[in-house]
Amino acid sequence: MTKSKHFKLELLGLFLCMFFVNIGFAQNSNDAKEVTNTYYIKNAFVVQKPGMVLPNTSVLIKDGLIQSVGPNVEIPFDAKVIDADSMYVYAGFIDACSHAGIKEEEKKDRPRVKNPGNPPKKLAGITPQKTVREAIGEKLDKSMAELRDLGFGFVHVVPRGRMLPGQGSILTTGSGATDETLVKENTSLFTQFKPARGMFPATTIGVMSQFRDLYKNAEYSNTYLKSYNMQPKGLTKPNHSAELGAMFPVVNKQMPVFFYTAKVRDVNRALILNNELGFKMVLTGVRQGWPLMDEIVAGKHSVVLSMHLPEKIEDPEEEKEEDKEDAEKEEKSGEKEEGEKKKEKKKKKKKKEEDPALAMMKAKKKKSHDEYVGQAALFEKKGIAFSLSSLDTKTKEIKPNLLRMVEGGLSEKGALAALTTNPASLLGISNVAGTVEQGKIANIFITDKSFFDKESKIKYVFNDGGLKEFKEKKKKKKGSKGDDVSVIGTWNYTVEVPNDTQTGIMIVDGSDDNLTIRINSADEPEDFVDATNIDLDGNNLTFDINVEGIPYSIDVTLEGTDFEGSVSVAEFGSFPMTGSLKDGPK
């Protein structure tokens, strides 16, 4: 087999191993197999939609779409077969409102303006015309990849900013350019009670006043524009600002306003504005909505609850029981405290805990905590079809918080609906997302157990036609040279690919619990790529990179000043990777 006749692997950017495969059948068993875009998931528990689990069911995927779902789906000759016996297949989750993919704005000094009472709209944070394309820029923030690895297939992304940051769009969590991941563009207007700095609107009341003013001016301008378009004779040519023009779909009830309302007072303020103006509203990022549930139901408002939860606190009664058990254990084992100082300290602690005021404060704090955690369950009981948002939620907290909501009374069916069918309906993408059905986008994922099992792990993620497999992390070997190794430094690496060898350097910086990794190729030494999803577990280092829309997963084990492992390149397979320390930490 020759390099030019059958396939070629070459470096593009980092070590972009793209396959250029001869079309047609190979002449002998040693020829390269054609790369496939067809996948067959065999004999899984398919959670087709909330409350409907199909056992011993197979799923056929081709060109990024679900082709068939059923017990007797035929296996195409060119399909990659995934034996998913006892595993669970889910539709990709949908984040109903997020800043995923958009970097946080750099902190700058407060801008100075000549007339703080009437500042430029952009400086005041009033940019309803701003789009997600503009907000994302050239490079996606790593948060999009982190959501993808949690099972999210779609995200309603809204710009960052102050009062009126801009318009939201729906994207897949794929790693391609914005154009390749867009599902629906400019589908919402995102707004919040976030005042400007040192200029109007500098207060929450000012924000409400400015929103009213913009809305009413947009209504007037829109009405005038319609009149002019019907009969321009005798009318002055319309001349409205970009800000007012962006509000036209809102005043025409064609675009919903996703109003960020975390606290109960924010929910109340948004309800007041909505009652006055009558726009289509989605209460978004809600953390304290339960006191106004009746008003929400009466107004038939859509709701997106926050996945953020307060820090977990223990029940005072449970703490007492635990203390009692600890005392009994100490008594049995003979581990009694000795010395007057220890006894006195324990006596003071007990007295403090028995203080009625402190007990009342603890009980109040616990009640507030339980209301936060139980909010989703209350909304479910009230019959409100809510969705969920990652706004203000750390990625690593999402699954634990979902499990806490279920512990707080939310049904698994309700939780799954809030992550799939409810947001699909809210965002108008039910025809392509939300369930595992023929014809829908195959942004799905597979877990080894039910997702709501605390011990469950994601094994495969399908996204925009690509597949990512999650392998078990290697355990650290006790007594190995890797026990004393520091990953910080500059490393040479080598990747062995058919008919070629790729080399480069990898720069690891930071600390073991907060690493940064930059990696390049010998052919393009000036072009570094930043890694995401970095994890150091003992002497096992894993991270992801993305080059020209293709995802790479690196998994290596460190042994002293050397490492070995593999790099998985999207659907193209895995290749051996070795390396050695070039320069230690500076």
Image (cartoon, rainbow, N blue to C red):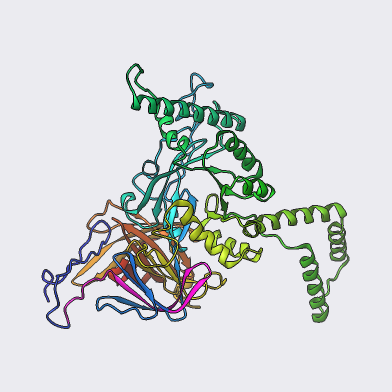
Task: Give coordinates of residue 82: x percent, y percent.
Answer: 36, 77
**Residue at (40%, 58%) from the top-left corner?**
431
> In the rendered view, does 548 fall on the left or right side of 470?
left
> In the rendered view, does 362 fall on the left or right side of 534?
right
Overall secondary structure of the magenta section: strand
> In the rendered view, does 176 fall on the left or right side of 2?
right
Q: Nearer the viewer, residue 112 or 487?
A: 112
How many circles with numbers are drawn on the protein? 0
Is residue 386 part of the magenta span, yes or no? no
**Residue at (30%, 76%) from the top-left corner?**
80
Task: Give coordinates of residue 422: x percent, y percent.
Answer: 51, 57
For residue 419, above or below residue 240: below
Query: Residue furthest toward the bottom?
Result: 29
**Residue at (46%, 68%) from the top-left corner?**
90
**Residue at (50%, 29%) from the top-left corner?**
214
Is residue 47 part of the magenta span, yes or no? yes
For residue 542, above or below residue 511: below
Q: Nearer the viewer, residue 47 or 583?
A: 47
Q: Write down the quadrant of residue 491 in the picture.
A: bottom left
- In which quadrant is the N terminus drawn? bottom left
For residue 315, above or below residue 329: above
Residues drawn in magenta = 30-56
In this rendering, does residue 167 appear at all? Answer: yes
In this rendering, does residue 311 appear at all? Answer: no
